[in-house]
Amino acid sequence: MKMILFVLHDPGRLDEVLTAWEEAGISGITVLPSTGLGRIRNHEGLREDVPLFPDLEDFFPHHEQTSRTLFTVVKDEEQARKVVQATQRVVGDLDQPDTGLLVIWPLAQVYGLVKKRISEPKRD
């Protein structure tokens, strides 16, 4: 089994990426908002400075650029390859700027991926 983590730089493409991954056979995907060091240093990342007692200016939108981090577990190298291809069909060549970062690593053990259904007791 393999873990796939993808940091999508353009959150506007999230639905397209999710659809592409589903078409590649992925049914479980976790999505988190995220930001990187560069965006934090440029004050474009996730805001953590909302005051306890806001004034009127605090209610106006601030430029905030966030990414989306997706992760999933796949069964083998073939499925991982399909996810990479599906991702690049949506965002383009991952070696180009402003597309994202995709990493894959092997998993030694996975627990809780396949849930067992508890059968209900028979009723007379």
Image: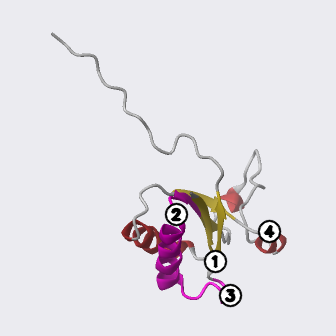
Label 3 sits on a secondary structure element that is loop
Residue position for label 4: 40
Q: Are marks 1 and 3 in contact (CB under 8 Å)?
A: no
- Which badge, 2 or 3, comes first in the chain's sequence? 2
In the image, residue 39 sits, relative to residue 88, either above or below, namely above
Label 4 sits on a secondary structure element that is helix
Q: Which residues are magenta?
A: 70-98
Q: Nearer the viewer, mark 1 or mark 2?
A: 2
Q: Residues within 10 Å of mark 3 (few under 14, many from 20)?
A: few
Q: Nearer the viewer, mark 2 or mark 3?
A: 2
Q: Residue at x 73, y 60 (%)?
A: 47
Q: Are marks 4 and 1 in contact (CB under 8 Å)?
A: no
Judge by depth and name the residue closer to the eye, 79 or 34.
79
Q: Is residue 44 left or right of residue 74?
A: right
Residue position for label 1: 100
Report, in whole angstroms, how far the alpha carbon at label 1 lies from the one at label 3.
Answer: 8 Å
Q: Residue furthest top?
A: 124
Q: Nearer the viewer, mark 4 or mark 3?
A: 3
For residue 83: magenta? Answer: yes
- Which badge, 4 or 3, comes first in the chain's sequence? 4
Residue position for label 3: 97
Which mark identifies residue 76?
2
Q: Are marks 1 and 2 in contact (CB under 8 Å)?
A: no
> Which amino acid type is shown beneath numbered disc 2?
Asp
> Which amino acid type is shown beneath numbered disc 4?
Ile
Q: Percent position (x, y) of residue 38?
A: 80, 74
- Which badge, 1 or 2, comes first in the chain's sequence? 2
Q: Is residue 23 left or right of residue 65?
A: left
Q: Residues within 10 Å of mark 1 (few under 14, many from 20)?
A: many
Report, in whole angstroms, how far the alpha carbon at label 4 lies from the one at label 1.
Answer: 17 Å
Q: Percent position (x, y) of residue 64?
A: 67, 69
Q: Residues within 10 Å of mark 2 (few under 14, many from 20)?
A: few
